[in-house]
Image (cartoon, coloured by chain):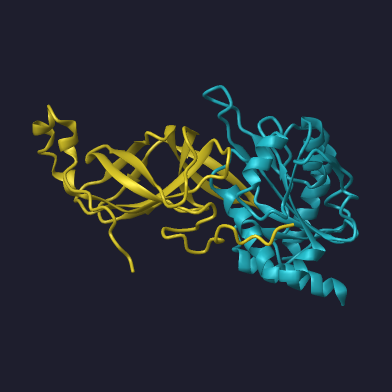
Chain colours: A yellow, B cyan
Amino acid sequence: MKRVSYQVAVVLLAFGIGGASQAQTPAANSIVVEQPWARATPPGAKTGAAYLTVMNNGATPDRLLGATTPLADKVEFHKETEESGVSRMREVPSVEVQPGAKVTFKPGEMHMMMVGLKQPLKEGQNLPLTLQFEKAGNVAVTASIGNVGAMKHGNMGAMPPGSSMGK
Amino acid sequence: MIVKLGVAIVVLLALAASVFLSTSLMIELPEPKITRLGTAAIGGPFTLVATNGETVSDKTFRGKWVLIYFGYTYCPDACPTALNSMSVALEKLGSQANDLQPLFITVDPNRDTRETMAKYLTAFDSRIIGLTGTKEQIDSVIKEYRLYVSRDKPERGGDDYLITHSSYIYLMGPQGRFANVIHAEELGDEIALRLRKEMADAGR
């Protein structure tokens, strides 16, 4: 069953002082983030990947400008394109979300690459992520960490840990 | 399809001449399942070092099928997907996996030391052997396997750079000859099916 993990309502409160004027932004409650998740990282990995779906229920386009997490130096948006058997990872500076549309970050297509991980991402733990939208402002979500090869939220399609038969 | 194959061959021949002149190689591979290049086209002798320090060459695994994924540990999306799918496939193959040697060869010897790879691979099936080497050794394998590898310039400086690379897993036969490619985004079950079929066809 699909589950809306994080219904993001008004986020401008996070700004505290000065928020009063920005709270008039009509799109403030239009951005919904669904099923944020990340993959556990192999030991020693310096990068990690997080995935989620952004829906724009508002009447005007919004733009995901960036993201941060306390667990990594920075978060970049990467899109994979493939041509003639070559996969090319491109950094995307920002991601537009049209009214009524959704944008999904998922393995093999688009991911949030966490660069300079400060600690390994461990299965079962959580990854705090703050998304910065042009209009909706900051949206804080918590991504659940699935296993190393998880293909979607909730670990489906991945090898259970420790199932290797050994040498 | 024939036209496409013809074009691919022409491209291969044309590029073979310029291969040594360029720092990054662009060779088109056939669509999996449908066509194959001549068996001489892909693969060849190499010498690399395994994560346990042992020297490994193309001859080390003669008599076994060899499944090779080229990637790098700095890659957070495509490489864990492929290594996990290979792990699942090995499980699915059961005892047939004994006829197969899975390898993870880095295309990023600069960052992927033996130690880095050994640690990284503990997250995947322990039968997958990680191989690295000097830049020259790795470049030589890249040429032989006609991989497209482009080490993107680090715009921000330092060690933070991405590598664009071919998204195929290579299957080499027990005699060391190229058998086929499997798309690296296939799920483990599908990879296992493909491997079974390849191994069965060869035994006929």
Quadrant of the frame with the C terminus of chain B = bottom right
Observer-nearest of B68 and B61: B61
Return the x and y of residue A14 as percentages of the image width and height. 19, 35
Q: Residue at x 11, y 37 (%)?
A: A23
In this rendering, position of residue B8 left or right of residue B164: right
For the image shown, how many numbered marks are present on the structure? 0
In this rendering, position of residue A8 left or right of residue B105: left
Return the x and y of residue A42 as percentages of the image width and height. 57, 45
Q: Residue at x 13, y 44 (%)?
A: A26
Q: Residue at x 66, y 58 (%)?
A: B86
**Measured along the vertical axis of the image, is residue B63 above or below residue A105?**
below
Q: Residue at x 78, y 35 (%)?
A: B133
Return the x and y of residue B11 as percentages of the image width and height. 77, 49
Q: Residue furthest top?
A: B157
Examine the image and state in which quarter residue B92 appears.
bottom right
In this rendering, position of residue A94 left or right of residue B132: left
Quadrant of the frame with the N terminus of chain B = bottom right
**Measured along the vertical axis of the image, is residue A151 above or below residue A22?**
below
Observer-nearest of B172 and B29: B172
Return the x and y of residue B18 as percentages of the image width and height. 81, 37
In this rendering, position of residue A127 left or right of residue B190: left
